[in-house]
Structures are given as structure tokens and as C-alpha cells.
């Protein structure tokens, strides 16, 4: 028989129970015991729901209150010294590593975060050195396996593999200059040996060991390390299913197929063409092949016919007992269930499949491939054919005006009228900003009052006019605060915006939206990605009204705020029937109109944020050039329609720029702001290495933590920055928007930022 498998499940709860419980704990309103109970309730619901949907291999051990990589670091004693000896509980040390802590005499910043491969999920980066003392403080995989077993659910534990864990880490500050985390493999393997042997002793049949770095080019140099690691682990462990996702194995397959593992998982949604090579490589081995045919990254209903063809090809080569039908990756990246959606039309709802529905899909496909004669399985197969046919019919429609406009794009539309050196002088006269100009990334705290007003408008409890008056008051508050604290380039604070992508999607043609389609971004930060279903266009201006109002109430220059085309695309669920390039071009043209309208309305600085441009980079280097060409071009298309006097800004966060620096230069934004506060200077060293002539604002404090930086701390960071970036190119700003922060910490942090910038002006 063909088995079915889910590689991981959303850990947020159908009604965001985990977010609510975690934030209540942080606020001192919920005990650690009650937080544990809330988490256990969500795990129980997840496991029982998957069992009811007839999934054979149900994941456990991947649940987290913050981040699964941070869980791993915590369990393996990879705890930086700054978090030790503070008198905190193990749980509070865990959260301090994720978000920092500034309370009860403890003042410690958070660890660095990075994007999880090419997704919008952030993981907490392990800090490793020669002094790292690996030991198994607790076996989380075993604890959750036993927890599920007590509920009558037999699960397959999930463990992040040793080589991926090390490669995803970074050298700690105390590490020697030539240290590389992979050098610690011999030290970490005994801990994995203990963890896996404990699972085997508990009766675990198989374990999912995630090694996602196997889809990266860098893994080609790790063949010996993989051979060493799995030769040591396989004899002591349950049957190991080596799990890859998000891309293809390529040449790494040559050594992977020789590893003594029981199973191998591949992603056939992202990389369907790899199937033939994988089958050929493992056919003469006993390896079981897990086929990721149901997307763990998008929300479109699976085409059963296409998935069954992949499955049948594998069965023909290997036999039924060596094939597993699975999700392509963990379902962490999808919403929990369509059952919560009440406002989608029947036609729209029929297009989609969320996590629970995807679990049913893998079970149905596996049943069909096993030769099931169950009437329910036959009915599900027939219903899928009807749904896919209807969706294909809808996809064939297009907006001719939008398609013709894309076809009419000329090379001249990608470039500003003059080079940066000329623009800089024109903008300096118009904006009249001081040396070390201060600004923010855009958003200010989204208070409970703001969220309530938005909810009341949605429910019809207040009128549009009443809501507008409320937003005006909020903008006034933000503008007056910025004037009072002494910021130089102001923003309107974005009180009218629910999310930096959703807000724009709601005003563009071509999108649909969910009520409860929440997906975890990091910690307790969840987003509701919009869904692109057809050609995109802008029917009316989207931001001009509020940016113009904000400018009308201050003498200081106001910065207009937009999300860029690549970010809107990457942070939405995109179409699968047309290329991403076309979708990005359509978004860029809509934003180009908005940028031009903002300039006409008197907005002298316009920020088009692209935090996802590095995130969207394909995982294989051979695929980079095509992506970078259209990604950079669509950003330029959105910003290049203005005069020299308008200063364009963009923002990037949690990205390694070294590999793509020429593309960052080619964006030709007048000012870019970057996340810098957690990255130990390495981002700026990249700018120094390659040379960067445009203006730059390195983020001087971490907004993802509630911790307030002191003025001296920001001064120190500015001094360090000035060893790399010339002072005439420097802006001073936080490292991201302030939406998730409270007003008290925001006021103090920005006051310290302005004071530090003033000090820099006087002493540079």
C-alpha cells in the first residue's frame, strides 16, 4: 500500500490560540502552566484532525511556541552566554533569545533572525563557536511523541538534521576568525545519537530528519560530512526518512542516494523534473521515496490527476510499498482550514485548499494509488476533476487592458531621468535635511483602539466618515509626536493599514482575501496573505489621500509609503497559471501610477519597500539571473516615473546581500534602509566590500524586540557604522516598521535615536 504523510502542521491554532496564549504570558496575564495547557490543546487538535483525515504518517515534535530552530538550540544547550545566569526560567530564556528581554533588572537583546530559505517565515539563528557545549537538555521529539501516543495517535517525530542545523547557524562573536559551524559536527553527533536512540527505545518506527540544505549549492561540498553523520546515526535511530524541500537535489543526489537511510523525501511541487533522476538513483537501493505532490507553500487545490501521474511513475519503478504521498513541505506556510472562511464565494472557495484540506488530499491520492474501491475516495477524485476544470476555465480569462500595458513596457521606463549624483543635489535643495537625517521605516504602533475602529467599520458599526475622522486624529498624533521628538523626514504612521501587503491587495483588482487565513511569520507575528487570482490593476489611488493629509499638517517633509511589487508578490499566495514575472510587472505598473500620483500631490520622498526581494531568490544559483533581472526591473519600473527632485527610498530586512550586491546597486533607489541591529556589522561590510554610492540607513535598533535601546547604545552603533559608510550618505532609522511595538517603548527608543543622531552631527 501507498502511505500518506504530512511533514508538519501549522502551530498557531485555528483561532490563533497560541498567539493569544503566548502574548498573554508575556504580559503576565497567563502562567507558564496555563501556556503549556493551551499549547497542548492545539497539538491535540492537530493530531486528532489529521488522524480523522486518514493520514498515515502524522508529524510530531515540530510544534513551537516561537520557532522550531530556536527549540532545537534550547534543547541542545546552544544558549549564548548573555542569557545565562540571569535568574530566568528555561522558558523565559527561550523567549529572551527570540525577542530579547528588558524587565526586572534584565536587559538583553534578541538573537538574530533570518528568513527560512525562500519563505516569509523567520528562524532564530543559532550562535556557535569552539566553546559551544552541546548536550541534550530535553528530548522534545520524544516528549511530543509520547504525548500524542497517550491520545491514541501514533506519530512520526520530526527532527532538524545535524548538518542543516549547523549550516543554518552562524559563528558567535567569540569564535575564531576561521571558524565555521560545520566544524562542530563531531561534537553535535553524540547529542543526535542520544536523541534518536531514545526515540528508538520508546518504540518509534520512523523519524523524519529534515535536511533542507541539501537543495542548496553549498551542500555539494558536504558529501563527506553527510556520509559521516548518517553512518553514525542510522544504526542507533528509528528508520530515518531524510527530508528535503523547496527545491531540487541536482548533483547532491549522487551522494544522497548512497546514504544508509530508510527513506528520502523530495519536493515535486517546486521541482517536478527531478523525479526521473531520483528514481534512477535509488531504484537499486531499499530507499522508500516520499513524493511531495501537495503544496506546503500555496493554497491552490491539488490537481489529483497530475499528482497521481507522479505517484504512478514512482510505483512503476519502485512498487507500492516504497512510495509515500506527502505534502511538499511542512504545512506551516499555509492557513489552518477553509472551514473558517465564510465570506469567500462558493466559486472561490472551491479553488483553494488549506492545511486540513491538504491533509485530506494526500490521504485521497494515496488511497487512489493503493487501488482503493471506497466510494468516498472515488467521489473525491471526481469532485477534484470538476474543481480543477472550473478553475482552468476561470484562469483562461484575462484583462486585455492590463496585458496590453505590460506588452507596451519600454526599456526607458525602467530608468530615472538622471543619475544618482545629479538627483542627490536636486533632492538636497528640496528636502533641506540635516546631516544624519532621522526617519522611520513607516508604520507606528497599531494600538487596540486602531484595530477596534477598523473592526467596527467592517461590521458597519461606524460610518466611513466617522472612521476617516478617527484616522485623521491618529495621523495628527503621529505627526505631532515626530515633530516633538525631532525626526527630520516624517511618515504618517499607517493607522489605516491592516498589513503592508493586504492593505494594497484590498485596493487592487485581481486579489481575494480570507477572514482567518493566518500564517506565522515569526514568533507571535502572524499575517493573512492575500491571494492573487487574476490580472492585477489599480482602479483608483491607494495612499494619496492619507499621505497628502499628513503633509498638509506639517512643515517638515512627509514620506509616502508603498510596498514594492516583488514583496507584494512574495507575501501573497501567487497564481500558478502564469509566470511570477508577469504578476510582478502588473503590480509594478499599478504602483508606478501610485508613485506618480503621490509626487503630483506634493510628496517629496516616496518609499517603496522590498524586504522580500532577497527572500524570493531561487535556492539554486543557476536560477538566479532570470529572477534578479525581472525582480530588479519591476522595482525600477514602479519607481522610475518621477522627477529628479523626488527622493525614492526602499527597505530590506533579514537578508544576506553579498551574493546579489550588483542587483542591490542596480535598484538605484536614492536611499535604502536595512536591518543591521542584529547582524554584527556583516551586512555593512558587504557594502564596504563592493562599494555603494547611494544613501543608506542602517537600522540602529531592533524593533522586533520590546527592549528599548539606550542613547549610548545607538551612538556606539553609529560610530561602528561610520567606519564603513561615509557620513554624507548616512540616514538614521530603526531597522523595521514600528507597527508591533507599544507607544511607550516607541517614544523612548525614538527619542534616544534622535539624540544619538544629534550627537553624531556635532561630533562627526
Image (spheres, helix red, strand yellow):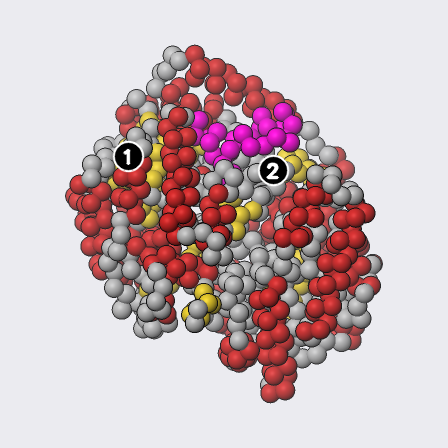
Disc nearer the start of the sequence (2/1): 1
Image quarter where the N terminus lies is: top left
In the image, is residue 537 above or below residue 366? below
Give the residue at x 67% y 44%.
Answer: 455
Residue placed most toward the observer, 375 or 647: 375
Q: Position of residue 723 (x, y in %)?
A: 52, 80
In the image, is residue 597 above or below residue 680? above
Residue placed most toward the observer, 260 or 99: 99
Q: Give the class, few, some or many, for how many residues have Cα within 10 Å of label 2's Cα (few <14, many ≥20).
A: few
The answer to whether residue 349 is seen in the rendering is yes
Q: Position of residue 157 (x, y in %)?
A: 30, 40
Q: Which residue is mark 2?
A: 515
Label 2: state its secondary structure: loop
Bounds of the magenta span? Answer: 334-360
Q: Quadrant of residue 552?
A: bottom right
Q: Which residue is mark 1?
A: 149
Q: Position of residue 515 (x, y in %)?
A: 60, 37
Left or right: residue 450 versus residue 210 is right
Residue placed most toward the observer, 749 or 237: 749
Label 1: state its secondary structure: helix
Give the spatial CA distance, label 2 vs label 1. 34 Å
Amino acid at each position: 500500500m501507498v502511505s500518506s504523510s504530512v511533514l508538519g502542521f501549522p502551530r498557531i491554532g485555528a483561532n490563533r490560540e497560541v498567539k493569544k496564549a503566548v502574548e498573554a504570558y508575556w504580559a503576565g496575564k497567563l502562567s507558564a502552566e496555563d501556556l503549556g495547557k493551551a499549547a497542548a490543546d492545539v497539538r491535540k487538535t492537530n493530531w486528532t484532525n489529521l488522524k480523522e483525515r486518514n493520514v498515515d504518517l502524522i508529524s510530531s515534535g515540530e510544534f513551537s511556541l516561537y520557532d522550531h530552530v530556536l527549540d532545537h538550540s534550547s534543547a541542545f544547550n546552544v544558549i549564548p552566554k548573555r542569557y545565562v545566569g540571569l535568574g530566568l526560567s528555561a522558558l523565559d530564556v527561550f523567549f529572551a533569545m527570540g525577542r530579547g528581554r528588558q524587565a526586572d533588572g534584565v536587559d538583553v537583546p534578541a538573537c538574530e533572525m533570518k528568513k527560512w530559505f525562500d519563505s516569509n517565515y523567520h528562524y532564530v539563528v543559532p550562535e556557535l563557536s569552539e566553546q559551544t557545549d552541546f548536550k541534550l537538555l530535553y528530548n522534545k521529539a520524544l516528549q511530543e511523541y509520547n504525548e500524542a501516543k497517550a491520545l491514541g495517535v501514533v506519530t512520526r517525530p520530526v527532527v532538524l538534521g545535524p548538518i542543516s542545523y549547523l549550516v543554518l547557524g552562524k559563528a558567535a562573536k567569540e569564535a575564531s576568525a576561521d571558524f565555521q559551524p560545520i566544524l562542530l559536527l563531531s561534537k553535535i553527533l553524540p547529542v543526535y545519537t542520544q536523541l534518536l536512540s531514545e526515540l528508538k527505545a520508546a518504540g518509534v518506527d520512523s523519524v523524519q530528519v529534515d535536511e533542507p540544505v541539501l537543495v542548496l549549492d553549498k551542500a555539494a561540498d558536504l558529501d563527506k560530512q553527510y556520509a559521516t553523520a548518517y553512518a553514525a546515526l542510522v544504526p542507533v535511530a528509528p528508520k530515518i526518512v531524510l527530508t528535503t524541500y523547496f527545491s531540487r537535489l541536482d548533483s547532491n543526489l549522487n551522494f544522497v542516494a548512497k546514504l544508509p537511510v530508510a527513506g528520502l523525501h523530495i519536493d515535486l511541487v517546486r521541482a517536478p523534473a527531478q523525479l526521473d533522476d531520483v528514481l534512477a538513483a535509488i531504484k537499486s537501493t531499499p530507499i522508500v521515496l516520499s513524493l511531495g505532490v501537495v503544496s506546503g507553500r500555496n493554497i491552490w487545490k491539488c490537481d489529483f490527476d497530475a499528482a497521481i501521474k507522479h505517484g504512478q511513475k514512482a510505483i512503476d519503478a519502485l512498487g507500492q510499498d516504497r512510495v509515500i504521498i506527502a505534502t511538499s513541505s511542512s504545512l506551516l506556510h499555509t492557513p489552518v482550514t477553509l472551514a473558517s472562511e465564510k465570506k469567500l464565494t462558493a466559486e472561490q472557495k472551491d479553488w483553494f485548499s488549506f492545511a486540513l484540506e491538504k491533509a485530506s488530499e494526500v490521504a485521497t491520492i494515496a488511497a487512489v494509488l493503493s487501488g482503493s474501491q471506497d466510494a468516498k475516495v472515488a467521489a473525491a477524485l471526481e469532485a477534484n476533476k470538476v474543481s480543477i476544470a472550473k478553475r482552468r476555465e476561470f484562469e483562461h480569462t484575462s484583462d486585455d487592458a492590463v496585458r496590453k500595458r505590460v506588452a507596451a513596457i519600454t526599456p526607458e521606463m525602467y530608468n530615472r531621468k538622471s543619475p544618482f549624483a545629479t538627483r542627490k543635489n536636486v533632492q538636497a535643495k528640496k528636502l533641506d535635511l540635516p546631516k544624519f537625517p532621522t526617519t522611520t521605516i513607516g508604520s507606528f504602533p497599531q494600538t487596540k483602539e486602531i484595530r477596534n475602529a477598523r473592526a467596527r467599520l467592517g461590521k458597519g458599526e461606524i460610518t466611513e466618515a466617522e472612521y476617516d475622522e478617527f484616522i485623521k486624529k491618529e495621523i495628527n498624533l503621529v505627526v505631532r509626536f515626530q515633530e516633538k521628538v525631532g525626526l527630520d523626514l516624517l511618515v504618517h504612521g499607517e493607522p489605516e493599514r491592516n498589513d503592508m501587503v493586504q492593505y494594497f491587495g484590498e485596493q487592487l483588482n485581481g486579489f481575494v482575501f480570507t477572514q482567518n487565513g493566518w500564517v506565522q511569520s515569526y514568533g507571535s507575528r502572524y499575517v493573512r496573505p492575500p491571494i492573487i487570482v487574476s490580472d492585477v490593476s489599480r482602479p483608483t489611488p491607494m495612499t494619496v489621500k492619507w499621505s497628502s493629509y499628513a503633509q498638509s499638517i506639517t512643515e517638515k517633509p512627509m514620506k509616502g509609503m508603498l510596498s514594492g511589487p516583488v514583496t507584494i508578490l512574495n507575501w501573497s499566495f501567487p497564481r500558478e497559471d502564469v509566470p511570477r514575472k508577469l504578476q510582478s510587472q502588473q503590480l509594478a505598473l499599478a504602483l508606478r501610477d501610485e508613485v506618480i500620483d503621490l509626487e503630483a500631490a506634493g510628496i517629496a520622498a516616496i518609499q517603496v519597500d522590498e524586504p522580500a526581494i532577497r527572500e524570493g531568490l531561487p535556492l539554486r544559483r543557476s536560477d538566479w539571473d532570470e529572477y534578479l533581472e525581472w525582480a530588479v526591473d519591476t522595482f525600477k519600473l514602479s519607481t522610475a516615473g518621477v522627477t529628479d527632485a523626488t527622493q525614492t527610498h526602499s527597505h530590506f530586512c533579514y537578508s544576506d546581500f553579498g551574493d546579489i550586491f550588483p542587483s542591490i546597486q542596480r535598484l538605484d533607489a536614492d536611499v535604502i534602509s536595512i536591518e543591521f541591529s542584529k547582524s554584527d556589522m556583516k551586512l555593512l561590510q558587504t557594502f564596504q566590500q563592493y562599494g555603494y554610492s547611494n544613501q543608506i540607513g542602517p537600522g540602529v535598533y531592533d524593533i522586533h524586540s520590546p527592549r528599548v535601546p539606550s542613547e549610548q547604545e545607538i551612538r556606539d552603533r553609529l560610530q561602528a557604522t561610520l567606519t564603513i559608510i561615509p557620513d554624507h550618505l548616512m540616514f538614521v532609522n530603526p531597522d523595521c516598521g514600528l507597527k508591533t511595538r507599544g507607544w511607550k517603548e516607541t517614544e523612548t527608543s525614538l527619542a534616544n535615536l534622535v539624540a544619538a543622531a544629534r550627537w553624531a552631527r556635532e561630533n562627526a
